[in-house]
Image (cartoon, rainbow, N blue to C red):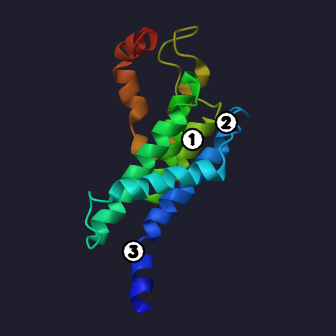
Amino acid sequence: MKQIETIREMFVPVASRVSRLFFVLSDLMNVDPMYQYSLKFFCMIYERALDKADGKVDKNERSKRKEFFIKKFSKLLYKNVCRSLFEKDKLLFSFLMCMKIMEEQEILDIVEARFLMTGATSIEMERPNPSGENGWLTNKAWASILELSRNLPAFLGFDRDFEKYLNDWERIYNSLKP
């Protein structure tokens, strides 16, 4: 009984990944009601991932087997779901999967993710818009850059760097393929 419990605990990360990605699928229904996936479909992909391990990963090497299941399931899910998505929604699906995986691995900064999703809330500018009045950079975008630099440690000083390389940023902004 102790051995079964030990094996079960080793595969908790597999269950964690699989369950998180199930909720990504259920969230897709909010994008388009046509994107409804059954539990049977999801289980079929999981079973395929388990079947793919036979002969490729030794059953005694549980750590490698666990990693194989996680990678194989994620890849199979992505490929199978992308077949049924409109082209415009594939990038969103990739992004949602990435966010869930980052959250699982505890490398997702919630404050940065919230800023990415909602944008800036500040309309106050400590410094004037560097592109000038009616320039290519809107006042709202400049206020967002200032708030980003002020509130997120990873972007500390970005506002000054942005001003320093303003012409390069304008070139990127105007580029058809930035």
Looking at the rendered image, the disc whose residue lies closer to the viewer, 1 or 2, is: 2
Residue 45 rendering spot, x and y as whole percentages: 50, 50
Looking at the rendered image, the disc whose residue lies closer to the viewer, 1 or 3, is: 3
Front-lying residue, 66 or 24: 66
Disc 1 or 3, which lies upstream in sequence?
A: 3
Tell whether 10 sits left or right of 17: left
Q: Quadrant of residue 19?
A: bottom right
Residue at image x 64%, y 53%?
Answer: 39
Tell whether 117 sits left or right of 14: right
Q: Callout 3: few (<14), some (14-19), or many (20+) C-alpha neighbours within 10 Å?
A: some
Residue at image x 45%, y 63%?
Answer: 14
Q: Which residue is mark 2?
A: 35
Q: Which residue is mark 3?
A: 10
Disc 3 or 2, which lies upstream in sequence?
A: 3
Amino acid at circle 3: Met
Is 37 placed above or below 71 here? above
Front-lying residue, 142 or 14: 14
Q: Quadrant of residue 164?
A: top left
Q: Which mark is residue 148?
A: none
| Element assignment for label 3 | helix
Is 142 placed above or below 52 here? above
Residue 52 rendering spot, x and y as whole percentages: 36, 53
Amino acid at circle 1: Phe
Q: Which mark is residue 115?
A: 1
Residue at image x 48%, y 13%?
Answer: 131
Marks 1 and 3, how far apart at CA: 35 Å
